[in-house]
Amino acid sequence: MRNIGPEILFLLIPVLFGIGALVWFLALSPAAKNRRKLKERMKTLNKKQLAGGGAAETPAMRLKKDESRTSLDKLARRLLPNPDILRARLEATGKDLSIGKYLGMMFVSGSLGAVAYIFMTDLPQYLAPLVGIGLGLLIPDRLVKRWVAKRQDAFVNSLPEALDMIVRGVKSGLPVAETITVVGEEMDGVIAEEFTRVMEDARIGMELEAALWASAVRLNATEFKFFVVVLTVQRETGGNLAETLENLSELVRSRKAMKMKVIAMSSEARASMYILGGLPFAIGGMLFLVSRDYIMTLFITDTGHTILMIAGVLLFMGWAVMNKMVNFEI
């Protein structure tokens, strides 16, 4: 580990403070807070207009079109070739995460990673920008992917109960649109948010199938796409919708049970992957505590750097192969 003197700490503190101040000014400034207050007012006006049955463009829609108001959002619109794809991915997380905030996450994680690399290792400093860029791209991407997957799993887990509720409503004579509204009102969590949003889109003039497909694309859940296909086909060709939805509910439950069975059967291989992948780091950490001079040879010599690079590549290849073996789509 590099010896950090007081003068370096005095330089490091203003750098980190400057990074935090820049991110606060660009993404979390009072202007952004005022925008959140404005968004709440727009939601109130939106509800009032929906209650009146108007099909015109609502204030919330106009606000969404003018989303890029912060400096980071404007910068992203200029630099990114297709910001709509990134915006749709961030929207799938279900969090208040704009492109500007995402860029702020990239900047902070990359900067902190580069600073930690410089002051906590004796490796060549010219690699610090590469380390910072890599961490800045990797960490926010992994976080967003995890949030999207978690939200998708929560939706799919609640979908069978929602389908059963729709079946009971259809059997009692209610139209499908009304049963979807009931699901949004009676259930909670992700599925209530999505079904409520579908009906809000339908009330402002969007076709029900189009609103459902927009939600299906946003969630990217195969089971929900089945549901949308069933409704679309039934509206065009007719048939017993209640019976079809009952079969779909059983299918969703069967897919969920199969996924759980696959997870149980692959748990041993998954545990082996985690153990074998973490073993080199655990042994390295113990050697660092017991014999620091011995393990630091890998970090301060050219031969050690070569060994670390080869070991890292082999470790990554082995992890990728084992991960592919225990993860597959049903």
Image: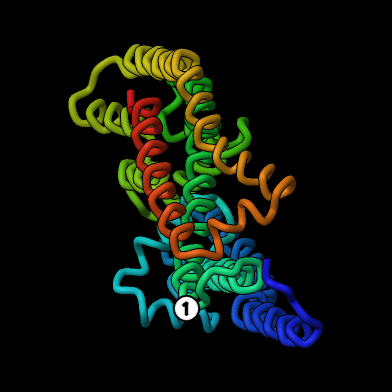
In the displayed structure, would residue 209 be above or below residue 273? below
Q: Residues within 10 Å of mark 1 (few under 14, many from 20)?
A: few
Q: Position of residue 198 (x, y in %)?
A: 45, 45
Q: Is residue 158 visible?
A: yes
Q: Which residue is under mark 1?
A: 126
Q: Position of residue 269 (x, y in %)?
A: 45, 21
Q: Secondary structure at mark 1?
A: helix
- Residue at the location (50% across, 63% down)? 135
| Image position of 269 (left or right of 40) | left
Q: Is residue 67 visible?
A: no
Q: Position of residue 163 (x, y in %)?
A: 46, 22
Callout 1, which amino acid? Answer: Tyr
Q: Position of residue 242 (x, y in %)?
A: 37, 16
Q: Nearer the viewer, residue 16 or 128?
A: 128
Give the residue furthest to the right. Answer: 6
- Residue at the location (62% across, 39% down)? 283
